[in-house]
Image (spheres, rainbow, N blue to C red):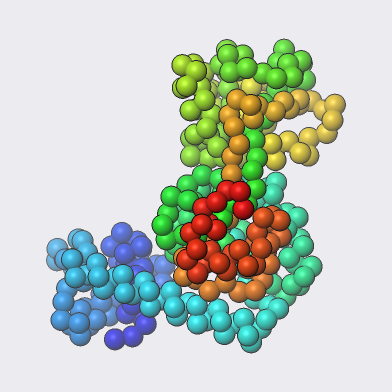
Amino acid sequence: MNLHQFRFVQEAVRRNLNLTETAKALHTSQPGISKAILELEEELGIDIFARHGKRLRRVTEPGEQVIRSIEIIMREVGNLRRIGEEFSKQDAGHLSIATTHTQARYVLPEPVTLLRRRYPKVAVTLHQGTPEQVAHMLLEERAEIGLATESLANFDELVTLPCYTWQHVMVVPASHPLAAVERPTLEQLAAQPLVSYHPSFTGRTRIDAAFARARLKPEIVLEAIDSDVIKTYVRSGLGVGIVAEMATRDEPAGGDLVARPVGHLFGDNVARVAFKRGAYLRSFVITFAELLSERLTRALILKAMTGNSLAADDPAL
C-alpha cells in the first residue's frame, strides 16, 4: 500500500464517490484511480466501497474505519511536510486563508499587510465562501486558517477561538426618514423593506431571531452575501440595509449613507478563527492569527490545538 492509494480513496470520498470528478481534481485518469483502489482493497482483504458495476455506490462498514485511518495518516503526512518547510524555510512559504467576503474586504487587509512586512517571502491566498465552505476548506486542507462568524464552532474537527466581537448597523440614504433616528426600534425596521445578508451569513440568524421573538415579520426584499452589494441597493432606494459594522468604517462622514448602531436590537456577534484539529501550524500562521486580534496569543493557540477545550470555548478569552 502507498500514499497515492490513500490519496485516491480520500479524494473519492470528498467527491461523493464520483471517480470522474476525483480524477479531475487529482489530475490523473479514472481507470488509474479505480485500479489503485482495487489493489488497496485486495491488499487489505476488504471492500472499502460497495459497487454497482464500475461505479462506487457507498462506503462499507469496514471502509468507514479504513477511511478514518487514512484521514489520520494523510493529516500527519501534511504535518510532516509543514514541519520540513518550517525548518528549511523558516521565513518563507505560502499561507492559505479561508474567509467570507465581509472579513476579506474589511478585516483582513491590515493583518495581511502586516504579515507581508514581517514575512516578505510568504505568499498569501484568500479563498472566499460561505461559513460552511470556509469550514470545509479547512477540513480538506485547502486552507490553514479560517475566519467567519457563523458555523465554524459547529464542526468538531475544527479548533476555533473567539477573535473579536461586532454588531450590526442600519444603513439608509441620508434623505431617508430613519436617518434622523439615533436608536431605531424593531418595529420601525419591520415597517420598512429590508436589505440584508443571506440566512447563513454574517449574523443573519440573530436578526431573524430578534424579529421572531418580537413576533414581527419584516419584508426582506433582497438577500446578499456581499456587504458592498447591500449598500449599493440601499443607495438605489430598494430598502433599509442591515450590515456588519465593519462594512461602514470607510463610509465618509456626511456622505450619502447614514449608519446607526442596532446592536441593542440584535446583540453581539463573535467572529472566530479556526484551524483543522491536529494540524501542524507553521510559525507565520500563528503570527497571522495574533495579528487578527489581541485576544489571540501563540500560547493560547498552541494550548487549544493540544486539546484544551476551555481555551477554545471561552468567549471571554
State the residue at coordinates (21%, 61%). 58
The residue at the point 49 percent across, 27 percent down is: 208
Q: Nearer the viewer, residue 230 or 119?
A: 119
Q: Quadrant of residue 140?
A: bottom left
Would you identify the image quadrant in which residue 125 lies? bottom right
Q: Position of residue 41 (x, y in %)?
A: 20, 79
Q: Position of residue 282 (x, y in %)?
A: 61, 74
Q: Residue 262 location in percent, x, y?
A: 65, 27
242 over 299 or under it: above or below: above
Which corner quadrant of the image does residue 109 belong to?
bottom right
User: As rendered, which of 224 and 25 lies closer to the eye?
Assistant: 224
Residue placed at 57% from the left, 48% from the top? 315
In this view, the residue in front, 156 or 28, is 156
**Residue 213 appears at what percent x and percent y?**
47, 21
Quadrant for the N terminus, please. Answer: bottom left
Query: As drawn, is 24 to the left or to the right of 193?
Result: left
